Image (tube, rainbow, N blue to C red):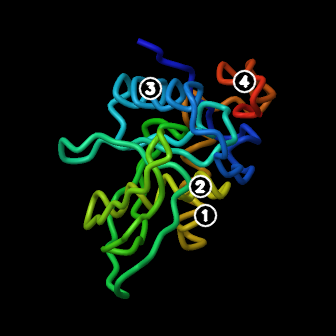
Amino acid sequence: MTVQPIRLFGDPVLRTPADQVVDFDVELRKLVTDLTDTMREQNGAGLAAPQLGVGLRVFTFDVDDVVGHLVNPVLEFPDEEEQDGPEGCLSIPGLYFDTKRRQHVIAKGYNSYGDPMQIVGTGLMARCVQHETDHLDGVLFLDRLDPAGRKTAMKAIREAEWYDPGAPPTVKVDPHRSPFGLGR
């Protein structure tokens, strides 16, 4: 297993837009493996590279027994239908808040070998793809809450056992740094 530590709320990497992947190489495939193993170890529905401290546009997902990944995603919305329901994040552990998302999404991108691929998602898959793509843009699901919901969420975060406002975010060496420019 190649389980990695997950960056928690407050770490600046979670607010930094990720770079496009340009090298579809063995380092990228190792990153996808690390993301998948870490996501599954934590029983997550998805995990984006910035959550492991890697500033690249790639995420993994495990929704309704469909496990996969997407590199350099671009989202399209076929309609205006919305869903509203509980959403959580491995970088904000144990907390869930009702969040509005689009009900349907088409995500286009690539696999780790550079082959084009597309995910058509509805419901939970659509929510997951939107959530993980937000991570790649430096956006947290808390940003999608209305002001009252955001206030409630921030109070819960400050009260969470894992939250430490006095400690600077932990910055570890990027396990995916390569001489070919994959890591940051």
Quarter residue 28 falls in = top right
**Mark 4 or 2, closer to the camera:** 4
Whole-angstrom CA distance, mark 4 to mark 2, is 25 Å
Residue 22, compared with residue 39, is above or below; it is below
Task: Kindly state the secondary structure of the residue where label 4 is placed.
Answer: loop
Q: Identify the residue under disc 2.
A: 140
Whole-angstrom CA distance, mark 4 to mark 3, is 15 Å
Q: Identify the residue under disc 3.
A: 33
In the depicted view, which residue is nearer to us: 119 or 47?
119
Q: Earlier in the sequence, mark 3 or mark 1?
A: 3
Whole-angstrom CA distance, mark 2 to mark 3, is 23 Å
At 49% from the left and 52% from the top, the residue drawn is 132
Does 78 sit left or right of 20 as displayed? left
Residue 41, compared with residue 76, is above or below; it is above
**Mark 3 or 1, closer to the camera:** 3
Q: Identify the residue under disc 4.
A: 177
In the depicted view, which residue is nearer to us: 146 or 100?
100
